[in-house]
Image (cartoon, coloured by chain):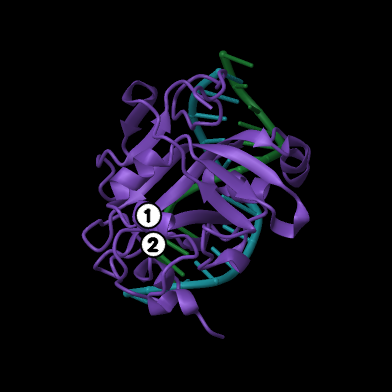
Chain colours: A purple, B cyan, C green
Amino acid sequence: MDFPWLRGQQSADPFHDEFFGRPVASVARDLLGARLVSTIHGERVVGVIVETEAYMGAADPASHAATRSGRTNRNRAMFGPPGRAYVYRIYGMHWCLNVVTGEDGDPQAVLLRALDPLDGEDVMSERRGGRSPVASGPGRLCVALGVTDELYGHDFALPPLQILPGWPLPDGLVERSGRIGVSAAADWPLRFFVRNCRGVSRPGGSSPRTIVPGR
DNA sequence: GGTCGGATCATCT
DNA sequence: GATGATCCGACCG
């Protein structure tokens, strides 16, 4: 098997190299409000990214690429060029989708945690067993989009899974907090989410109501 | 509405 | 052999 994205090639879209080649926290923040378009298995599904987490690379103890473990077969995509997918399985049953960022070789990635559905709600709902199409949580997001490890290393500039960054949301709509579910570096404020928005995880909070502003 | 425990396995030590 | 960037259904109030 050949992995051209491991050889430091440019992505199909130079803008993506520029956008995703930036430091991970900036990318995680600016991905809020961006559209994620999946045409996996011929079903078109679109959502607005409303929650992300940044994982900072070797110096981040919560990262899969922390110095302690370094480069492994699982995390090899993180060490490749930016704008590619890092997909992994967690708890033996859920897929999680990340976008690699930063310079080629620097293992940074943004975990995509939640989407507010924009199109294809019927498909998303069906894939989730008739439940709400709202993709709140990284595992649900992958189910709703049809993402599995088939997409490992995929270039987000290309179908069947594309990220269409827009103008960054105004600061007033963006909140930060510690990352969810991590034990190491739990207080690092690297989770970014849209204020008061449907789909966003609320540890200890009330149920979500509003939809994402500023579409 | 909120909390709790079980499911389930690739990956790394 | 232990661990985990989670989800869901059951149960409680």
The chain letter under disc 2 is A
Q: Position of residue A191 (x, y in %)?
A: 35, 39
The kind of secondary structure element at disc 2 is loop
Q: Is residue A70 left or right of residue A132?
A: left
Total numbered labels: 2
Badges 1 and 2: C-beta atoms under 8 Å apart?
yes
Residue A196 seen in this snapshot: yes
Q: Amino acid at mark 1?
A: Phe
Q: Is residue A206 above or below residue A53?
A: above
Q: Is residue A203 left or right of residue C11?
A: left
Between A58 and A40, the one lying in front of the other is A40
Q: Which residue matches tag 2?
A: A82
Q: Position of residue A53 (x, y in %)?
A: 38, 44
Q: Is residue A96 above or below residue A71?
A: above
Residue A179 seen in this snapshot: no
Q: Amino acid at mark 2?
A: Pro
Dot 1, crowdedness within 10 Å: few (<14), some or many (≥20)?
many
At a point 36% along the width and 25% down the height, the residue shown is A170
Which numbered disc covers residue A20? Answer: 1
Which numbered disc covers residue A165? Answer: none
Q: Is residue A54 left or right of residue A132?
A: left
Spot the residue most to the bottom. A1
